[in-house]
Structure formats: C-alpha cells, structure tokens
Image (cartoon, grey):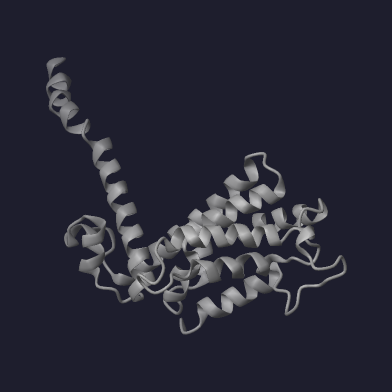
C-alpha cells in the first residue's frame, strides 16, 4: 500500500514544476497587453483594433481574448491599471523620506510617464470613476493633496497653489504632440514639467502678494469634476 501514494505522487511532481513559470508568463502577457492597449487608446481611441493591440503586445489575438473576452473588459482593465499605478507612484513618493516638494516632483514625473490624462479621456463613457476606485480601493488624490499641504506649510511652494494646479498641468503636458512634430516629445515634456515645478516655489512669484489668476480647483472640486466627466455617457 505504501507504493500507491508514491506512484500517484510521482507523475505529479514534474507537472507541477512549470506552473510558476506559466503564471509569470501569463502575468507578463497581461502587462504587455495593457501597455499596448493604453498606447493604442491614446492614439486611436477605445475602438482601436484589437488585433493591432495584440501585435503591439507581441501576443496572439487568441491570447488577448483569453485574458479579455470583451472589449469592455480590456477598457476596464486599462483604467484600473492606470489608477493603480498612479496610486503606487503617490505612495512611493510619500514613503521615501523625501521632502514634500521633492516627493511632489517625483510623483508628477511618474504621473507624466503614465499618460493618465491621455488615456482616461479616451475611455469617457466606457467606465465610471466609482467602478475604477472600487477595484483599486485607493485614490491617489488624497496622498498627493497631503504632499501639497505639507509643501505649502513648509513654505516650499506658493500658498495659493492647489491640487488642480498640479493635475491640470500634468494633463496638458502628457498629451502627445502630433506625430513627428517635435523629436523626443516625452523628454521635452519632462523638461517643461521641471520648469513648471520650479515656478511653484515662492521665489517664482512676481511679487510677494501676487495671487494666481483663474479658478482654484482644489482636491474636493477635482473629485467632483472627475466624476462628472468620467460618468458622462455611461448611463
């Protein structure tokens, strides 16, 4: 009787060994598909051809459909992936022991790389903010707004800078210029972002009592606006 378990267990050992590699491959394929879909949505909108996305990801169309049976599944996954990466960037920036302005700079450059403001407009009406945040369970707005508050209180940035001054600039800079219009467009966007961040310092004001013109879009107002924009057309 002692040979029965051995005989039963014997064939299973070699079969179980490849499983971690298969899981890693599946995870890598998924990440490649999401990156390719994000780029395609920026360039062509949410109706970008799925076979083109698969080609960019370096996978077969059957692999894409196994991971995301419907286009809506892929759109939702891209949105969740971007929001998750955005929160992780905010978390890393706050936990590295940097000063609040350096942490804010790190986050802004990471957010620029994510091109969230180019991706999300392409998905308007296809997925809601509540749906995304329910899956992510974290919101980057809150830690970034806290960094902003600390930087203001430390006198590192102008006292009238609010959350929208950070996010709207990232939105403006992350929109790609027409293809081939300017070489190294992404690197140039990071250069411009550094110029802008330096302009947030108090020394960048024309005079000590100068106030920024236009409406102040604080974190609460930004959340309301984001919900209205993302939810438009979803009903």
* Res 61 quadrant in image: bottom left
Coordinates of residue 84 in the picture (x, y in percent): 49, 55
Does residue 86 show up?
yes
Instruction: Give the camera-side residue of 142 and 93.
Output: 93
From this viewpoint, is residue 139 visible?
A: no
Q: Residue at x 67, y 39 (%)?
A: 97
Q: Could you tell me which residue is drawn at 31 percent across and 61 percent down? A: 36
Q: Residue at x 57, y 62 (%)?
A: 192
Decide: is 213 above or below 103: below
Nearer-the-camera pick, 196 or 143: 196
| Rendered location of residue 5, percent (x, y) | 17, 21
> x, y (%) of residue 172?
54, 71
Q: Position of residue 9 (x, y in %)?
A: 17, 25
Exactly how many numbered labels are in the figure?
Answer: 0
Residue occupying image coordinates x 87% and y 69%: 209
Judging depth in this view, the residue of 60 and 110 nearest the camera is 110
Question: Is 64 left or right of 76, judged from the image as shown?
Answer: left
Asked whether, in this view, residue 94 is left or right of residue 64, the answer is right
**Residue closer to the observer: 165 or 234:** 165
**Where 207 sits versus 191, above or below?**
below
Quadrant where the image shows the N terminus: top left
Q: Using residue 70 as the reference point, say whether residue 143 is left or right of it.
A: right
Which residue sits furthest right?
209
């Amino acid at each position: 009787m002692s040979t029965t378990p051995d005989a039963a267990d014997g064939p299973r050992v070699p079969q179980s060994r490849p499983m971690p590699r298969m899981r890693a491959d599946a995870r890598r394929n998924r990440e490649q598909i999401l990156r390719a879909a994000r780029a395609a949505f920026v360039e062509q909108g949410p109706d970008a051809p799925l076979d083109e996305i698969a080609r960019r990801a370096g996978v077969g169309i059957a692999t894409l459909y196994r991971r995301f049976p419907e286009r809506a599944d892929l759109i939702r996954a891209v949105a969740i992936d971007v929001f998750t990466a955005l929160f992780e960037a905010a978390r890393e920036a706050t936990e590295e022991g940097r000063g609040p302005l350096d942490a804010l700079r790190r986050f802004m450059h990471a957010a620029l790389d994510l091109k969230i403001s180019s991706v999300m407009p392409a998905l308007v009406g296809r997925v809601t903010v509540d749906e995304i945040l329910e899956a992510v369970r974290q919101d980057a707005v809150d830690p970034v707004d806290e960094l902003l508050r600390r930087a203001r209180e430390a006198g590192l940035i102008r006292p009238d800078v609010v959350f929208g001054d950070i996010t709207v600039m990232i939105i403006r800079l992350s929109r790609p210029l027409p293809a081939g219009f300017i070489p190294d467009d992404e690197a140039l966007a990071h250069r411009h972002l550094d110029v802008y961040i330096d302009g947030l310092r108090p020394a960048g004001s024309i005079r000590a009592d100068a106030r920024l013109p236009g409406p102040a879009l604080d974190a609460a107002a930004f959340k309301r606006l984001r919900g209205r924009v993302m939810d438009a057309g979803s009903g």
